[in-house]
Amino acid sequence: MQQADVFAALSNPVRREILVRLRGGPVAAGNLARGFALGRPAVSEHLQVLRNARLVREERRGRERYYHLDPRPLSEVETWLAAFTRYWKDRMAALETVLDEEEGDA
């Protein structure tokens, strides 16, 4: 299977919630599945998408599988969003200038 796109992996709210739950440290697959109204197989599919996107890594401990957050691929998202952040900051600064000018004319 081709490596999953980080943006596609983040597009699903269940996968985003899994990442949020993993921020506190590794969590066993069974414990992750208990927190959702989905069956274990569905949560496993979401974990597979996150693994393929390199957002989580799996560690076997005996019969359990623990999942760890790997935030490194999120830097790709941060870089992509930075251009939009700059865009909106520039737009807001331009709006502020116009409003200041209008206020000065009043």
Image: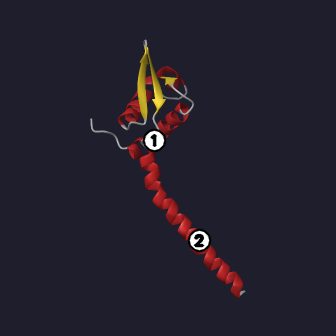
| The residue positioned farthest toward the left in the image shown | 1
- Please tell me whether residue 50 is drawn above or below residue 59 in the rendered image: below
Work out whether residue 68 can be spotted: yes
- Please tell me whether residue 33 is drawn above or below residue 96 in the rendered image: above
Measured Cα–Cα span from mark 2 to mark 1: 33 Å
Q: Can you tell which mark lies on residue 58? A: none
Tag 1: residue type? Asn
| The residue positioned farthest toward the bottom in the image shown | 105
Query: Residue 7, image x and y in percent?
Result: 41, 46
Residue drawn 49% across and 40% down? 13
Tag 2: residue type? Ala
| The residue positioned farthest toward the right in the image shown | 106
Q: Can you tell which mark lies on residue 12? A: 1
Mark 1 crowdedness (10 Å alpha carbons): few <14, some 14-19, many ≥20? few
Query: Residue 70, image x and y in percent?
Result: 45, 35
**Quadrant position of residue 101:** bottom right
Mark 2 crowdedness (10 Å alpha carbons): few <14, some 14-19, many ≥20? few
- Please tell me whether residue 8 is drawn above or below residue 103 in the rendered image: above
Work out whether residue 39 can be spotted: no
Task: Return the disc, 2 or 1, that comes first in the chain's sequence.
Answer: 1
Label 2 sits on a secondary structure element that is helix
Query: Residue 54, image x and y in percent?
Result: 39, 36
Query: Residue 85, image x and y in percent?
Result: 52, 60
| The residue positioned farthest toward the top in the image shown | 62
Colour scheme employed for the rendering of this structure: secondary structure
- Quadrant assignment for the C terminus: bottom right
Which sits in the foreground, 34 or 4?
4
Residue drawn 63% across and 73% down? 96
- Quadrant assignment for the N terminus: top left
Which sits in the foreground, 71 or 65?
71
> Which residue in the structure is indicated by mark 2?
93
Residue drawn 55% across and 34% down? 23
